[in-house]
Amino acid sequence: MKAPPKEACRSQLTHAIDEWVVLSLYADRDREIMRRRLVDGAPVEKLTSEFDLTEQRIKAIIDKWYDVIFEHIE
């Protein structure tokens, strides 16, 4: 997992999430999970109850999209 750039701001994160979390059966859900985690800073435990998913599934979604998002933030 790539370290996020220190200068990444909320608007950059939101734009990258909206732009690059695509081509997935659950893209809308995945975008919302990534927004809640990266922009709002919600802990994984809170996301499990919000989205009715297991902790392992939430972590897998975050791992899947994390590098994709930060690849596109300069």
Image: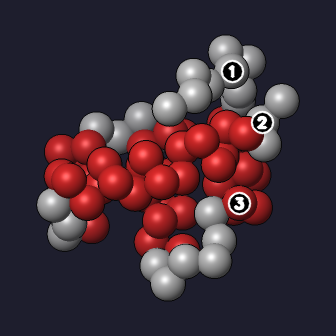
> Where is 66 relative to 24, above or below?
above
What residue type is disc 2 on? Ile
Q: How far apart are marks 3 and 2 (CA)?
A: 11 Å
Q: Where is residue 45 in the image (x, y as percent from the top left)?
A: 18, 45
The answer to whether residue 38 is left or right of residue 44 is: right
Q: In which quarter of the image is the C terminus?
A: top right
Which of 66/39 is in front? 66
Q: Name the residue under label 3.
A: 20
Q: Where is residue 55 in the image (x, y as percent from the top left)?
A: 18, 52
- The residue at the point 63 percent across, 63 percent down is 21
- Disc 1, SS: loop
What residue type is disc 3 on? Trp
Q: Mark 1 points at which residue?
A: 5
- Disc 3, SS: helix
Q: Name the residue under label 2.
A: 73
Classify mark 3: residues with Cα within 10 Å, few (<14), some (14-19) or many (20+): some
